[in-house]
Amino acid sequence: MNLTAALRYLDQHTNLEATAGRAEGLSLDRMRDLVDALGDPQAAYPVIHITGTNGKGSVARMVTSLLQAAGLSVGTYTSPHLERVNERITWNGEPIGDDDLGRAIGSVAAVEELAGVVPSYFEILTAAAFTWFADVAIDVAVVEVGMLGRYDATNVVDAAVAVLTNVGRDHTDGVGAWRQAIAEEKVGIVKPGSTFVCGETDPELRPILEAAPAAETWWRGVDFDCDQAMLALGGRMVDLRTPSGVVEDVYLPLHGAHQADNAAVALAAVEAFFARRLDDEVVREGFASVTSPGRFEIVGREPTVVLDAAHNVDGARACRETLREEFTLGGTIIVVVGMLGGRDVAEMLTAIGAEEAGFLVACTPDSPRAIPAPEVAAVATSLGIVAESVPSVVDAVERARALASPDDLILVTGSLYVVGPARAALAREVDA
């Protein structure tokens, strides 16, 4: 298949990311049948498998960079994408090319009838990634879970290292023992004989996490941690501790205290994979080259424009704390925000600190799950925020820029479906 045909084929299959994000009768049987028909490509290389409510994408990027600095050929599978579907599948940090992506998806299409299943959009991309990684003979795959854990399509891998970043409220109604239910789902990626690197520190979840069938478990706060994190120009200087010792003065070019915790998880995961200490200079080299597009990414100056794909309450709070800690503003904050269904709009706006903003522009993400911009603006107004609605994401960003003075900060947030189009539009403007 060429890319056009491959994307057409993809779009003919159910995309749970674009709908309600829920499925009945959860099972890995369909995905197992699909990869079996492909010859189980996911078994051709060792895997580091990463789950968690927040931070798993950033941890995946950090793990990839550390493995590359150690000299390995690394395939990385993440989701969703910001601008192009190619971003989900990378080799040594570079997105899969159009021709390779078309061929990889075509390989899946070719066995669909043989497998006897009708896979989902995400299952097709996951199988395509596993196939391409086997074709290019990577040394190790870094695989980010989609929205689930035990029943996520990626969980057909038998990972050498399973990583849990944290447990928070997302894709849940928040009723009853929801934290325990999420923890049970997330630890479903831990396989017998693996090393489990656990970044979640809630003692109430410890019995569930301890029951995971790992050969060994590394606990954040006990076996590994970030011992010190200080603000630095464009990021932080951190001291990271693992069972092998402490590496000091590591520059992490990312914004937010939460990224220091993510760095601790990432380093522990890589040392668990190698079963040895990484050379300090390899650690410093790996972290120094990390990027995290769309995660508190500064893409403009005068006014400062920040893109942050905070899409749940914990992410929104982290964004607010990063703004408060790292930025001293001469002007005001203008928020451009759009959200998907399942969010409590008032709770999200409060978490992100929108009540402290000078103005808010609500937009409608390009998704069937989007909350219409007028609804978001109405809630903002009820909270005492000066707000208006501009349905188009790109037009909303332009409206904010028209309102902003050079000393202001524009924060674009609420969803990847907002940050992605905004990022693409701003990049086109720079290139023009």
Image (cartoon, rainbow, N blue to C red):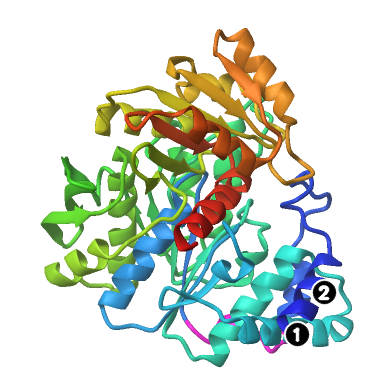
- Mark 1 surroundings: few (<14), some (14-19) or many (≥20) residues within 10 A: many
Which image quarter: residue 127?
A: bottom right
- Report the side of 238 relative to 193 (left or right): left
Residue at left 48%, top 44%?
54
Say which of 45 and 283 sits in front. Answer: 283
**Which stretch is magenta?**
36-45
Secondary element under disc 1, as helix, strand or loop, is helix
Residue 162 position within the rendered picture, expressed as x and y whole percent measured from the top left = 46, 62
Q: Which residue position is annotated with label 1?
A: 106
Residue 411: give x, y in percent of width and height.
46, 34
Give how far across and how far down residue 425 sits, in percent: 56, 53
**Three-letter amino acid code of the residue under disc 1:** Gly
Quick check: 10 above or below 302? below
User: Is 305 included in the stretch rendered in magenta?
Assistant: no
Please name the residue shown 82% across and 72% down the image: 8
Q: Quadrant of the N terminus?
A: bottom right
Within 10 Å of the Cα at label 2, are there few (<14), some (14-19), or many (20+) other Cα atoms? some
User: What residue would you read off at disc 2?
Assistant: 9
Q: Identify which amino acid the numbered label 2 is placed on.
A: Tyr
Sequence-earlier tag: 2 or 1? 2
Residue 266 seen in the current view: yes
131 left or right of 269?
right
Is residue 173 toward the left or the right of residue 413 in the image? right
User: Does the stretch in magenta take in 38?
Assistant: yes
Given contact means CB atoms under 8 Å apart, are the residues at marks 2 and 1 in contact?
Answer: yes
Cα–Cα span, label 2 and label 1: 9 Å
The residue drawn where x is 66% and y is 21% is: 377
Q: Position of residue 2 (x, y in %)?
A: 74, 85
Q: Is residue 315 visible?
A: no
| Left or right of residue 141: residue 63 | left
Residue closest to the far left? 248
